[in-house]
Image: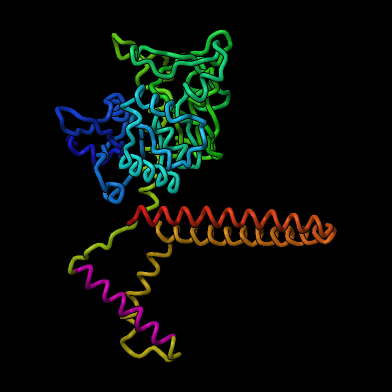
Amino acid sequence: MANSDLSLLLPRVLIVSRRTVRKNKFVNFVGEYHLDLIVKYGAVPVIVPRVSGLDTLLESFEPIHGVLLCEGEDIDPSHYEAELSGLSLDEIENIRNLHPSDTTIDKEKDSIELRLAKLCLERNIPFLGICRGSQILNVSCGGTLYQDIDKEISVKCPESQRVVHMNYGNYDGHRHSMNVVANTPLHDWFKDSFEDEKMEIMVNSYHHQGVKRLAQRFVPMAYALDGLVEGFYDPNSYNPQDGKFIMGLQFHPERMRNPDSDEFDYPGCSMAYQEFVKAVIAYEKRLKGSEFIPRATKLSEELELKRRVIVKSFSIAKDIYKSDSQMVTGQSSELEAGANFLQATTALSLQQEKRLKQVGATVRNGSYYTHVLKVNQVREKLARTMMANMSIEHLSELMSFYGLMRQICSDTLERKMNELVQEGS
């Protein structure tokens, strides 16, 4: 098979580019380390250009078997309702001066990547977020970010616990310690590199923001010495062999290499990409299996004639059955074609078997929802009994509390709906 045909066979991983200025013109780019590793482990990287309006055209990139999000600017705080950081205007301006290339918000890239992240979460498409990509993943699930690590974390830490997360003078060579959490994928990947029974490795990073409140669905996999989350994943969506992989890494395993060679600092550095692509391949196979529908075959003239004879045979048999009449002379030979066809096709086809299994699943799901309904009825009865024993004062306080919650939900919902309307206008 020609090499040009490989792209038709290998699963596709979408990667959104980053925009920068070169020779007074905008250009888009993606780091080659990401692309090399995706190709090395058996997938095809498909670069999604950061172009205005592309967030509405993502269906054009189907089929999507995996998404890798990596470099980029700070995420617009409006996407995660930034909590009050206590930073003054002078401090915010100082942050912008220190990190000019990161604090320039790119709303188009935000929109594209947030849509892709939510698409992956909805369909269980394998997702790997590196650095900014991990922050996108956390924000898309309701988490928040620190506006600036130095201003919000480092100043509160003892000198011995402070961590430099970005070193412009030693970009790739800079490292800081990271403690790995036991019984997580990161622990499995790096366990052979731990020393003195400490689950600790040295990692690099280039960021001045990071996870503040981790979204509820995620579990931390590693922390920096200052307490910042350096990696997290969804344990309910992690099984690479079954096509499940939802993970965010704040550090850059793809760049943890010897400057004189492509050898990694630790054997586990490439595992994030290896396991991610494994999940992508499995997801692609599963997707093909679920979406396969045999196309109608155009019959030759001879087969089309046989088909009509069989259809006529069934039609005659149906008329005899409905009218409860006797078979007339000459009909026996016409009925023979249908009888022979039925005798040769008594076994179910794969498609018929699949549909029967789907019916079975529907029945099982129906039983489950019936059970849930009964449980809710029991809970309602218990709640009514409990409230009947409560005092008027307690009931009044309870009613007031839930009334307040209802108003807050209503106000928040109205605000979010207005934001959607404004975005669409």
Residue 281 in the image: state x and y as whole percent.
Answer: 37, 37
Residue plotted at (24% across, 39% down): 49
Q: Position of residue 294 (x, y in %)?
A: 31, 58
Tell me the quarter of the picture where residue 29 sits. Answer: top left
Q: Which of the pair 196/141 is nearer the observer?
A: 141
Colour convention of the picture: rainbow
Quadrant containing the N terminus in the rendered view: top left
Tally of numbered discs: 0
Residue at 43% from the left image edge and 56% from the top image edge: 418
**Residue at 36 percent of width and 34 percent of height:** 69
| Quadrant in which the C terminus appears | bottom left
Above or below 173: residue 112: below
Q: Position of residue 314 (x, y in %)?
A: 36, 78
Q: Which residues are magenta?
A: 302-321
Q: Is residue 273 visible?
A: yes
Toward which corner of the image does residue 350 lie, by quadrant? bottom left
248 vs 152, nearest the viewer: 152
Q: Percent position (x, y) of residue 14?
A: 31, 39
Q: Is residue 155 magenta?
A: no
What is the chief secondary structure element of the magenta stretch?
helix
Asked whether residue 307 is drawn in magenta, I would say: yes
Q: Nearer the viewer, residue 327 or 424?
A: 424
Is 255 displayed left or right of 19 in the figure?
right
54 shown above or below 156: below
Is residue 270 at all visible to an observer of this figure?
no
* 200 to 23, vertically: above or below: above
* In-image side of 44 versus 158 (left or right): left
Residue name at image x 27 percent, y 30 percent: 30
